[in-house]
DNA sequence: AAATCAGACAACCGCTCCCGA
DNA sequence: TTCGGGAGCGGTTGTCTGATT
């Protein structure tokens, strides 16, 4: 089977550390359209990266709900226990640790947990050697197969994590065919760097009659207060807790988690439960920003 | 202060799996 | 049933940073 060319074989593809500008473009695109096709995404997002690189950057670093910082003792113990049972099934192990990525778990294992686990095994072996006779005697004639641990099934894993984006799958977008994204082609053609740094602080807010049922326009941006930056995406942790407190029952777990940007792209129907204007935020519909 | 080393983490690469035509 | 292509996974490498000499 012919292989698709890897990133380094595609001319003009950037490699290495992501810049803040690249991150901003990826966030802007995925937040707006979801990840309908990683391979096509870089072209439409204005990125000189291969799709795999974009996917990895989003899943491991940019997507909402990522937990950063040190692993807790409980997390480390869980990793060690699960690794003992499952081996190098990093994605399965990571699924049991909300907010942690497989890459992060894998790295943490190799840098610090592996040695500890080996040390534990050595310690246990020493302990076992003194008790081996008792253990052998106590398990003789018993069926110990029931002690096998069954890995969690995929439904359990997805329920724990919640959706990754406003579009939980490409099927939620009006079409999965790249041919139907002609409107994007024409948009991307005209876009320049100023778009990604567009100042939305003075964008008129309010309700624009939505006569278009196309999923790509049936959304709106929530803009939190205090947007002192000239950039569209700056850090602000307050939004998640605000939504959480405001109307938890109508907002799924994705939106109740702090998402580190102060401009949020949300399903339009979600706004029906929120005030259209308040001291807390303003609403800017796609029609305002993208017209 | 400079050089070296080690640990941590980000990113790449190649393979396999899975789905749709 | 076969084949092509995209997504996902795990191993590996590269890079950065702080500690040590």
Image: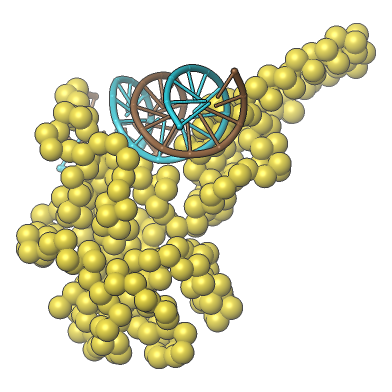
Chain colours: A yellow, B cyan, C brown
Residue occupying the point 86% across, 16% down: A127
Front-lying residue, A128 or A1: A128
Q: Position of residue A267 (x, y in %)?
A: 36, 73
Can you give x and y, in whole percent of width and height, for residue A84 in the image? Answer: 65, 26
Q: Position of residue A155 (x, y in %)?
A: 52, 49
**Residue A168 or A241: which is nearer the viewer?**
A241
The quarter holding residue A148 reads top right
Determine if residue A113 is in view. yes
Task: Give the side of residue C19 with respect to residue B4, left or right.
Answer: right
Numbered marks: total: 0
Image side of residue C1 versus residue A31, left or right: left
Whether residue A203 is situated above or below residue A166 in the rendered picture: below
Q: Quadrant of residue A175?
A: bottom left
Q: Nearer the viewer, residue A264 or A266?
A: A264
Q: What residue is at 14 percent from the left and 33 percent from the top? A: A10
Residue A50 lies, in percent from the top left, at 22, 40
Left-right relation of A183 to A115: left
Figure check: A191 above or below A66: below
Q: Which corner quadrant holds the N terminus of chain A?
A: top left
| Residue A73 relative to residue A6: left or right | right
The residue drawn where x is 13% and y is 38% is A12
Question: At x 66% / y 31%, what residue is drawn?
Answer: A80
Quadrant of the rendering where the C terminus of chain A is positioned = bottom left
Residue A23 visible to an observer of this rendering: no
Q: Is residue A194 above or below residue A203?
A: above
Q: Nearer the viewer, residue B7 or A267?
A: B7
């Amino acid at each position: 089977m012919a292989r698709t060319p890897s990133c380094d074989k595609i001319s003009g593809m950037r490699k290495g550390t992501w810049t803040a500008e690249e991150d901003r473009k990826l966030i802007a695109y995925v937040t707006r359209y979801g990840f309908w096709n990683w391979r096509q995404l870089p072209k439409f997002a204005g990125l000189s990266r291969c799709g795999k690189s974009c996917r990895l950057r989003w899943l491991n670093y940019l997507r909402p709900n990522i937990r950063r910082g040190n692993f807790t003792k409980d997390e480390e113990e869980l990793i060690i226990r699960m690794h003992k049972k499952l081996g190098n099934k990093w994605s399965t192990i990571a699924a049991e640790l909300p907010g942690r990525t497989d890459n992060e778990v894998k790295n943490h294992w190799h840098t610090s947990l592996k040695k500890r686990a080996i040390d534990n095994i050595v310690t246990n072996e020493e302990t076992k050697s003194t008790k081996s006779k008792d253990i052998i005697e106590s398990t003789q004639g018993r069926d110990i197969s029931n002690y096998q641990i069954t890995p969690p099934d995929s439904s359990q894993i997805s329920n724990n994590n919640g959706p990754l984006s406003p579009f939980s799958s490409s099927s939620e977008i009006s079409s999965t065919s790249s041919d139907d994204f002609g409107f994007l082609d024409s948009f991307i053609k005209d876009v320049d760097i100023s778009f990604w740094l567009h100042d939305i602080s003075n964008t008129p807010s309010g309700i624009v009659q939505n006569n278009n049922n196309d999923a790509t326009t049936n959304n709106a941006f929530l803009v939190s207060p205090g947007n002192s930056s000239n950039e569209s995406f700056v850090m602000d942790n307050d939004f998640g807790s605000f939504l959480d407190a405001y109307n938890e029952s109508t907002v799924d777990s994705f939106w109740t988690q702090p998402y580190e940007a102060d401009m949020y792209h949300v399903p339009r129907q979600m706004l029906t439960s929120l005030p259209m204007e308040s001291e807390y935020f303003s609403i800017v519909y796609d029609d305002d920003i993208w017209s």
